[in-house]
Image (cartoon, grey):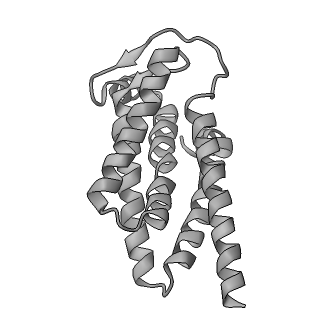
Amino acid sequence: MEKKNNYLINITIALCSIYYFWMLIRIIILKNGFIDMGYNSNLVLFDFINQYHQSGLTKVLLVNIIGNVSLFIPLSIILRHYFSFLNNYNIAFIGFFTSLSFELIQLGTGWGVFDIDDIFLNTLGCLIGIIIYHFINQHRQNNVSTSLFLLSFGSIGLISVYNYAPLLLTTFII
């Protein structure tokens, strides 16, 4: 019976992982459809963040920061689950490289803005995911159940951020 449960848990984790990567592509690359936004870029760290702050766009700034950080938290959990031999530095590097790849795709296609701030915030999210995974894994018996719990939590968070963060932040933040 336990073997069947582990199989179902692993299938669920695989489906959550596939869904996560689809949402990541949808949110980062396809957020504006295939509309060419031109070839814009921000190569100065915290420049867009400072521009939002100075323009009084605090709500937009918070959505941007929370969204970019939370998008990459599940990535570390997925990597830790499937590639347990990777150390934290490898996972952080893969998170950085994944974010850089998405930004280069946006730059090359014109479907978004290449933003160094996004790379920094995405990598920070990956690091936070590593910390969360280790913290929760210390208090649980089974790595598979830890991965399932965290991926479920991460997927729900990802959907929430994508669908509701702009509405919630606009409503509750003055």
Among the 4 quarters of the image, the one containing residue 88: bottom left
Left or right: residue 1 compared with residue 110: right
Left or right: residue 102 compared with residue 42: right
Figure check: 7 above or below 1: above
For the N terminus, the quadrant is bottom right
Q: Tell me the residue at 52%/14% (across/down).
A: 110
Does the image show residue 79? Answer: yes
Q: Tell me the residue at 72%/83% (across/down).
A: 4
Figure check: 112 above or below 129: above
Count every numbered label the image shows and give the total: 0
Q: Tell me the residue at 38%/72% (across/down).
A: 134
In percent of width and height, residue 90 lies at 30, 54
Q: Tell me the residue at 54%/67% (across/down).
A: 150
- Identity of the residue furthest to the top in this view: 38
Does the image show residue 123? Answer: no
Figure check: 75 above or below 115: below
In percent of width and height, residue 20 lies at 61, 50
In percent of width and height, residue 51 lies at 37, 22
User: Which of the two residues, 30 or 3, is positioned nearer the viewer here?
Assistant: 3
In percent of width and height, residue 105 lies at 48, 24
